Amino acid sequence: MKWLWLALAIWGAVHPMSWFLAWFNANGYDLMAMVDAWHVNAATSGLVWDLTIAAVALTVWVIAESVAERRWLGLLAIPATFGIGVSCGLPLYLFLRGLRGR
């Protein structure tokens, strides 16, 4: 399973990032303009909040488990989650957990 998690983490990094880069190329490299675009209507705002809450839940889980088990490699999933997205951070964390024999 760990290799499936890694493949999903890579896909979760590359695919969304290709859309972000296409948006930046079309609209300029303005992060706040992208944040504004995420809130153009109630549907996109709902999706942003859904992903934000999932990212926070994943972060709490990663921190709690990393501290309890004193295995710090899993913390790499946090910047992946907030820098790329939950689609990368969650499978990355599951891959990293798999490296330690879970």
Image (tube, rainbow, N blue to C red):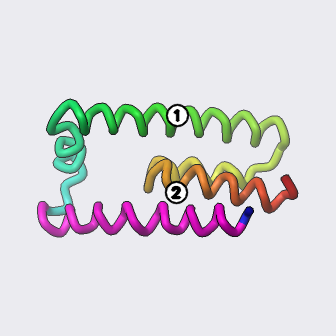
Label 1 sits on a secondary structure element that is helix
Residue 27 is labelled as none
Name which quarter of the figure residue 59 lies in.
Answer: top right
State the residue at coordinates (26%, 34%).
Answer: 45
Q: In this image, 28 relative to 35: left or right?
A: left
On the rendered image, what quadrant is the N terminus found in? bottom right
Main secondary-structure element of the magenta-colored stretch: helix
Residue identifier under label 1? 56
Instruction: Rate crowding at label 1 as few (under 14), some (14 to 19) or many (20 or more) other CA atoms within 10 Å.
Output: some
How far apart are labels 1 and 2 at the CA level? 14 Å
Q: Is residue 10 magenta?
A: yes
Farthest residue toward the left? 27
Q: Is residue 22 magenta?
A: yes
Farthest residue toward the right? 101
State the residue at coordinates (18%, 69%).
Answer: 25
Viewer-proximal residue among 40 and 63:
40
Q: Which residues are magenta?
A: 3-27
The percent position of residue 34, horizontal first and vertical second, equals 21, 50
Pointers 1 and 2 in contact (C-beta within 8 Å): no
Q: In this image, 91 relative to 3: left or right?
A: left
Viewer-proximal residue among 8 and 93:
8
Instruction: Name the N-terminal-most of marks 1 and 2.
Output: 1
Q: In this image, 77 relative to 86: left or right?
A: right
Indicate the amino acid at tag 2. Cys
Q: In this image, 14 relative to 80: left or right?
A: left
Indicate the amino acid at tag 1. Val
Residue identifier under label 2? 88
State the residue at coordinates (24%, 35%).
Answer: 43
Name which quarter of the figure residue 95 lies in.
Answer: bottom right
The percent position of residue 12, horizontal first and vertical second, equals 48, 61
The percent position of residue 75, horizontal first and vertical second, equals 66, 49
